[in-house]
Amino acid sequence: MGLFSKSKSLIGLDIGSSFIKVVEMSERGKGFQLLNFGMAPLPPEAIVDGALMNANVISEAISELISSHKIKTKEAATAVSGHSVIIKKISLPSMTDEELEESIQWEAEQYIPFDINDVHIDVQRLSQGANEAGQMDVLLVAAKKDMINDYTAVISEAGLMPVVMDVAGFAVQNQFELNYEVVPGETVVLVNIGASIVNINILKGGITSFTRDVSMGGNQFTEEIQKQLNVSYEEAEALKLGGDMGSESQAVVPQEVEGIIASVSENLAAEIQRSLDFYAATAAEDHITKIWLSGGSAKVPGLTRVFEARTNIPVEVMNPFKNVTFNERQFKAEELAAHAPMAAVGVGLGMRRVGDR
């Protein structure tokens, strides 16, 4: 789904609140080959709840990342999420695509809590035919124009051409469909845990049934470790992922870190559970068979175990490179595996092509 688009092959540019990720892929038959993958860190507070607070730093980081990986493609697909994006599954009287395009602006006013003139609107038909009541399901997406303008401005400033604007949760869904079997009628949950936003997308038979963005994420782990153990941001980040504690924090006891991580993981799992409970109340007949995690914080030690204990649902970390081929002389499999959870949105964006919807 694109709020606007048109291009050929393009790069996936995931502008996250702690890292920028770039993915370039080429189509190979029915699959994809990885041409480029890179990440660049952003300073804390450069992006807050999806809002770009330091445009110069972000555009410079994008430019340096593109330059260092010698990427020649200029057209880019990126994604947005957070409070400035509204996603609603709605039912409308059965109509043609042309009629839908004409009527959606009026229909959207009933569902969007923003001034309709302040948002970009897009719509995706979820069912081809009408149900017995003559209704069809569609997915309505609205994103605030000022946020879209901010993102396109930093991308343009970095020397790229923004041609596709996607939604982070749908980009994760794209790569999931590439890498994993979509079972008809099966309900699964895709949870993308970024630094400051968690994207939740519940799929039934590969079709979105429920989405929600939660304003929490990996930063909670880092901030709690910093606060309780009195260490630097960099040390807290390393401790969060079970890495080297650094010379200044040798006094830190691993059990202390584990306790903090367990506490924050429990809070995160409780928030996910609330979304699942809300969905279950509206779709009692659906049985969720699996939760798939992605995002940088999917690698936090013990997180999948906490999620499984809280939800009683099997949990697995996604690998967006699972069905993507790559040159083993150019990429080391173990390095791709280490960074894979962070690449889910980027791979989904890298699959986009000009003119698709």
Image (cartoon, rainbow, N blue to C red):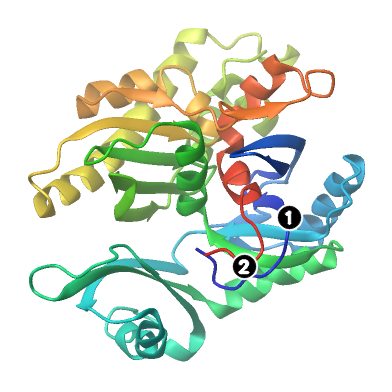
Residue 36 point in image, percent of width and height: 78, 38
Front residue of 204/219: it is: 204
Q: Is residue 284 left or right of residue 316?
A: left
Q: How many marks?
A: 2
Q: Name the residue under label 2.
A: 355
The residue singled out by tag 1 in the image is 10
> Relative to 286, is 50 on the left or the right?
right
- Residue 255 tag number: none
* Residue 83 visible from this viewpoint: yes
Judge the density around disc 2: few (<14), some (14-19), many (≥20) Cα neighbours within 10 Å. Answer: few
Secondary structure, mark 2, is loop
Which residue is farthest front? 29
- The disc, 2 or 1, on the residue closer to the chain's N-terminal end is 1
| Residue 231 shows in the view | no
Q: Which residue is drawn at 35% across and 87% down?
A: 99
Q: Residue at x 44, y 15 (%)?
A: 258
Q: In this view, does 191 lie above or below 328?
A: below
Examine the rendered structure and indicate whether residue 137 appears above or below residue 311. Answer: below
Query: Where residue 15 sits: x, y (%)?
Result: 66, 52
Question: Which picture quadrant has residue 177?
Answer: top left
The front one of 190 and 17 is 190
Please state which of residues 76 and 211 is positioned toward the viewer in this rendering. 76
Camera-side residue of 7 and 90: 7
For marks 2 and 1, give the one nearer the viewer: 2
Marks 2/1: CA–CA distance: 11 Å
Image coords of residue 1 (percent x, y): 50, 63
Decide if residue 340 is on the left or right side of residue 218.
right
In this rendering, the answer to whether 208 lies above or below 119 is above
x and y, in percent, of residue 19 in the image: 68, 43
* Residue at position x 40%, y 17% in the image: 259
Q: What residue type is labelled 2?
A: Gly
